[in-house]
Each structure stands twice: as C-alpha cells, then as structure tokens.
C-alpha cells in the first residue's frame, strides 16, 4: 500500500511521526514500567561489579586454581563407590563448571587482564 505525499503530511504531522508514536505506545504497553537510574547509582553499580577484580577474587590465577581443584574432584568421583548414574551426573556437572571457568578465563584474557592483580 502506498501513501501519497500529500496525504502523508496533513496538518503538519507526518505519517512517519504517527507511526513512531504508535510504536512507542505499544512498546510501553508491552514492556511495562520504565525505570530511570541516577548517575550515582550507575557509578556505584560499575564499582561494585569491578570490586572482585580489584581485590583479587577474580583473576586468571584464581580461575586456574579452581579448574585444577574441580579436575581433582572429578578424579575422586571416578574412584568413588557411588553408583554409575550418580557418578556420571556429578562428573557432568563438574565438567560444566570447568567449561564455564574456561569461558571466564577466555573473557578475562580477551579483555587484557593480567594473570595476577
């Protein structure tokens, strides 16, 4: 469907502006409540997010230590007397943890963080 230019610009309002308003009203209805954050709140959030990196809780070295610990736990699990289905479930969970830790290592390394803080 095509709208001629004369019909689209009636009374100083463009058809595009009308569509934008309709889309914004629908977005408000779909998205629900809107929230505004102060600059201080955003700054506090950013500082809290980077605090574990500053105090050494999150470092490549700590991630590597945890990976080695989980690998040791997997070795203990294989040698345990648990039923096979329990072993496989526990080992699968620990392998998932290793995968997440390695993804964290990759992200840290990609961001340029050093091994130690």
Image (cartoon, rainbow, N blue to C red):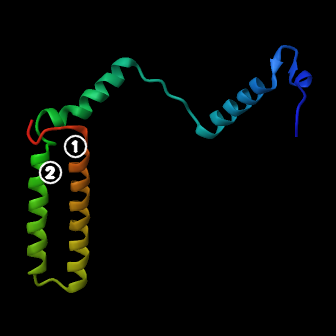
In this figure, which residue is indicated by the disc labeled 2?
A: 63
> Against 21, is 30 above or below?
below
Q: Where is the N terminus found, in terms of image quarters?
A: top right
Residues tagged 2 and 1 counted as in contact (Cβ below 8 A)? yes
Q: Where is the C terminus found, in terms of image quarters?
A: top left
Between residue 71 and residue 85, name the one nearer to us: 71
Disc 1 element: helix
The image position of residue 86, as x and y in percent, is: 23, 80
State the residue at coordinates (15%, 83%). 82
State the residue at coordinates (56%, 33%). 33
Q: Nearer the viewer, mark 2 or mark 1?
A: 1
Going from N to C along the chain, the mark reached first, 2 or 1, is 2
> Against 40, is 58 above or below?
below
The image position of residue 97, as x and y in percent, is: 23, 61
Query: Which quadrant would residue 71 be assigned to in this image?
Result: bottom left
State the residue at coordinates (10%, 81%). 80
User: What label sits on residue 79 in the rendered view?
Assistant: none
In this figure, which residue is indicated by the disc labeled 1?
A: 108
């Amino acid at each position: 469907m095509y709208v001629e230019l004369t019909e689209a610009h009636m009374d100083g309002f463009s058809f595009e502006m009308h569509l934008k308003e309709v889309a914004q009203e629908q977005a408000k209805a779909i998205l629900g409540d809107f929230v505004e954050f102060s600059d201080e709140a955003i700054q506090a959030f950013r500082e809290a997010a980077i605090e574990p990196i500053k105090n050494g809780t999150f470092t490549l070295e700590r991630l590597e230590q945890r990976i080695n610990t989980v690998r040791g736990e997997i070795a203990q699990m294989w040698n345990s007397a648990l039923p096979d289905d329990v072993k496989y479930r526990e080992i699968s969970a620990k392998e998932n943890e290793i995968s997440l830790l390695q993804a964290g290592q990759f992200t840290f390394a990609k961001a340029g963080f050093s091994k130690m803080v």
